[in-house]
Amino acid sequence: MTTETVLATPEGLRGLAHFRALLAMHGDDADTDLEIRRARLKAMAAAVPRPRDVTVTDTVINAVRVLQIDPPSWSGQAVYLHGGAYVVGSADTHLRMAAKYALASGARVWSIDYRLAPEHPYPAAVDDATNVWRGVSENMPTVIIGDSAGGGLALALARRVLSQGLSRPAAIALVSPWADLTLANNSINTKAEAEIMLSKRGLALDAERYCGGVPTCDPNVSPALADLHDMPPLLVQVGSDEILYDDAQMIVDRMEAAGRNVRLQIWQGMTHAWPAYGDLVPEAAASVKEVGLFCRKWLNHKE
């Protein structure tokens, strides 16, 4: 295991303070109607200019809607799984992030518009991701990138495709992964004051929506509790001040215990999903660059 600590910049901390004030205006997700949360995220995404320097194609793969995002030149490909606690977000709301990963990695990115809970609880999201994986991964090296709930989904997808004997992921990059839906980790409580995006109450409600009747301790919905002995090389990025810090640490510990290749980056002063904060937080671009370099390495790796 390799552990790296990335120090915060003064600009980054000021940017986070700006977003703390902005998000405080919206209140706790646990107190907000789900449709309002969805509409708010959609409106915020619509206000951001469409990314340049990439070609975006709206397509369908094995009955699942996907955005195909191509940088000017590309080699290899990535499956991208967006965050949103399994209940909000889409390939459209996260187009900007997917495009940034395409440019940083030099890979074609398939951003999956997987079905959301509670209308479509587990295993719908994993099924959708698996169906896309079947359709795109056979002919060239493919990595998986996931942030927040997309990070947990990335691990669930990897476990599913490995158990079914499908094409092996070249590597997996996780950013602020939500991978233990039991919410039993200490950081859920100890870092609650520092966190600016998530709350334990909100996560508990969304976990119930996603799991349906499946216990939150089931490793299929909480892959941080799973056996990770067969995982490909893994990069885990986590902010030192986010309530999901221990989710990341648990994944890393399980990978290390299984003797797998894992690299942990701890970004000092950062809170949950800081790469989404854009230009006001320099660490956002730095995080994306690190993910891109990691993907390039393993997409071009020769056995």
Image (cartoon, rainbow, N blue to C red):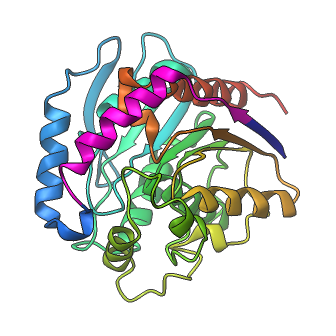
**Along the horizontal axis of the image, is 231 left or right of 244?**
right
| Residue 170 to residue 225: above or below | above
Q: Nearer the viewer, residue 194 or 3?
A: 194
Q: Position of residue 77 (x, y in %)?
A: 53, 31
Q: Residue 23 vs residue 232: left or right?
A: left
Residue 230 visible in the current orientation: no
Residue placed at 51% from the left, 22% from the top?
10
Residue 62: percent from left, percent from top:
35, 53
**Which quarter shows the C terminus?**
top right
Q: Residue 231's x, y, as percent?
A: 73, 55
Numbered label tally: 0
Image location of residue 152, percent across then percent down: 52, 60
Residue ID at (47%, 18%) = 103
- Is 14 a magenta residue? yes
Residue 120 position (above or below residue 89): below
The secondary structure that most of the magenta stretch takes on is helix
Q: Quadrant of residue 206?
A: bottom left
Question: Residue 267 falls in which quadrant of the image?
Answer: top right
Horizontal side, residue 33 vs residue 18: left or right: left
The stretch in magenta equals 5-27
Foreground: 216 or 268?
A: 268
**Picture layout, residue 216 above or below residue 128:** below
For residue 17, say whether it is visible: yes
State yes or no: residue 233 in magenta. Answer: no
**Which is nearer the eye, 279 or 210?**
279
Please report the residue visible at 52 percent of the width from the left and 78 percent of the height from the top. 182
- Give the residue at x 65% y 29%: 7
